């Protein structure tokens, strides 16, 4: 990870010095362990703030929408796919971007780490295979693979799909991953079980909208939940309102979601709302052969019509 | 919606031209029959607003 950091700083300094970009978006160390923050560097002298490790799960594509200046952006596999989605949706111009591609080995799930130890974590460091956790009176080494975010352990697009420069050699993509085991488990339930499953899943939701705000796809000037004329969805914490928010938001991400996990990561109560988007992702793949953000040359399934689109559901 | 626990058959999609009156009648009959067989919808009904 250290070599990634050095390379990112080197590239960022060069871009800013040469005036190729006006700003580099990357990560800096957070004030608490495992919580790196987005960092915007405009001066070549400040590049030492930039870092890279397994806690850079925030999706930086979220900071690109409608920017006017030339931007260098640090992008792992999923960020790059979201950048592609932004380009396709005309939220940013490809020519404005210098993409610093980071071949990713997965991001650490801070909840899994916290669950593996007792007491407050003061410092977390990692090498290629292990994560060392240090706190008051304890030290523990965890297997990195076992504390990855779930979406990262299921990821098959670890290398950026577009980039202007890579910080390292591409990493091998994971083979033979069963990405939709969770979705199939829900599909196999009967309607009542499904209903109860989602009731249970969303029971903790406080509707803080952190998932929406962390999501690079959620860039509507006024979100449907904030709209009051007309008011599409109730604003209360009634389970029906909560559910309406979550499934409608998921629909808005259909054919666009890259399963970057930013929503789940941002959730203060740890809801795995990815089970909604994951189902739509699976349907898109099975029915339209589509995976979001892989190319700027194709239009997404929701804005194209093909005579052979599946239509068995229309009677 | 079905993925979320709405019974299969409660939501139906159909495409009927304004010239296809017989098809329209048939579709309406089929939909009402299926939904009646399923009984009243108990989900997505707000009985009383929950106060936090």
Image (cartoon, coloured by chain):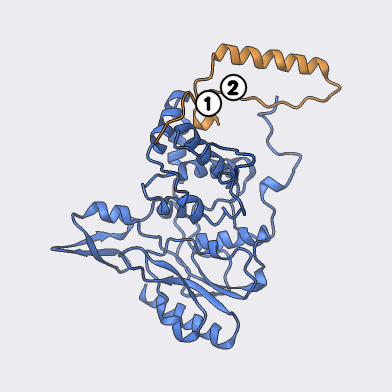
Q: Residues within 10 Å of mark 1 (few under 14, many from 20)?
A: some
Q: Quadrant of the C terminus of chain A?
A: top right
For the residue labelled by badge 1, is the local secondary structure a helix, a strand or a loop?
A: loop
| Crowdedness near tag 2: few (<14), some (14–19) or many (≥20) residues, C-alpha within 10 Å | some
User: What is the CA distance from the residue labelled 2 to the residue labelled 1?
Assistant: 7 Å
- Residue A238: percent from left, percent from top: 45, 33
The chain carrying label 1 is: B
Chain that is orange in the image = B
Q: Which residue is mark 1?
A: B6
Q: Residue furthest right?
A: B19
Callout 2: chain: B
Q: How many callouts does the rendering have?
A: 2
**Residue A199 % position (x, y):** 42, 32
The image position of residue A53, as x and y in percent, is 37, 68
**Could you tell whether B31 is left or right of A44 in the image?**
right
Q: Is residue A233 left or right of residue B52?
A: right
Residue at 67% from the left image edge and 68% from the top image edge: A93
For label 2, the residue is B10
Above or below, comparing residue B1 to residue A224 in the picture: above
| Residue found at x 26% / y 55% | A114
Q: Colour of chain A?
A: blue
**Residue B45: % across, % down:** 51, 24
In the rendered image, which quarter contains the N terminus of chain A?
A: bottom left
Q: Is A134 drawn above or below residue A232 in the view shown?
A: below
Q: Please name whichever residue, A228 or A208, is drawn nearer the observer in this view of the structure.
A: A228
Residue at (56, 60) in percent of width and height: A81
A51 relative to A147, above or below: below
Identity of the residue drawn at 54% across and 65% down? A63
Task: Kindly check if marks 2 and 1 are in contact, taking CB atoms under 8 A apart as contact.
Answer: yes
Residue A147 appears in which quarter of the rendering?
Answer: bottom left
Secondary element under disc 2, as helix, strand or loop, is loop
């Amino acid at each position: 990870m250290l070599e990634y950091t050095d390379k990112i700083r080197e590239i960022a300094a060069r871009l800013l010095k040469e005036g190729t970009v006006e700003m580099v978006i990357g990560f800096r160390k957070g004030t608490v362990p495992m919580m790196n923050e987005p960092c915007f560097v405009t001066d070549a002298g400040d590049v030492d703030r930039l870092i890279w490790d397994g806690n850079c799960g925030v999706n930086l594509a979220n900071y690109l929408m409608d920017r006017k200046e030339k931007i260098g952006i640090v992008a792992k596999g999923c960020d790059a796919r979201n950048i592609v989605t932004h380009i396709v949706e005309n939220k940013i111009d490809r020519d404005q971007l210098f993409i610093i591609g980071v071949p990713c080995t997965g991001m650490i799930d801070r909840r899994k780490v916290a669950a593996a130890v007792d007491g407050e974590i003061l410092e977390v460091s990692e090498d290629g295979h292990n994560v060392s956790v240090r706190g008051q009176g304890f030290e523990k080494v965890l297997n990195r693979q076992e504390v990855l975010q779930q979406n990262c352990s299921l990821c098959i697009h670890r290398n950026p799909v577009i980039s202007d420069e890579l910080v390292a050699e591409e990493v091998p993509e994971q083979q033979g991953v069963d990405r939709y085991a969770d979705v199939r488990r829900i599909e196999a339930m009967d309607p009542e079980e499904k209903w109860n499953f989602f009731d249970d899943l969303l029971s903790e939701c406080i509707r803080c909208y952190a998932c929406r705000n962390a999501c690079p796809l959620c860039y509507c000037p006024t979100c449907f939940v904030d709209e009051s004329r007309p008011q599409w969805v109730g604003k209360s914490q009634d389970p029906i309102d909560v559910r309406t928010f979550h499934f409608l938001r998921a629909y808005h991400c259909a054919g666009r979601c890259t399963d970057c996990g930013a929503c789940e990561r941002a959730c203060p109560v740890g809801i795995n709302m990815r089970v909604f988007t994951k189902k739509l992702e699976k349907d898109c793949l099975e029915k339209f052969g589509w995976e979001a953000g892989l190319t700027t040359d194709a239009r997404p399934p929701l804005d194209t019509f093909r005579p052979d689109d599946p239509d068995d559901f229309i009677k | 919606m079905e993925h979320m626990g709405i019974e299969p058959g409660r939501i139906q999609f159909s495409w009927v031209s304004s010239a296809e009156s017989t098809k329209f009648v048939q579709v309406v009959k089929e939909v009402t029959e299926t939904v009646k067989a399923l009984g009243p919808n108990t989900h997505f009904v707000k009985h009383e607003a929950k106060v936090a």
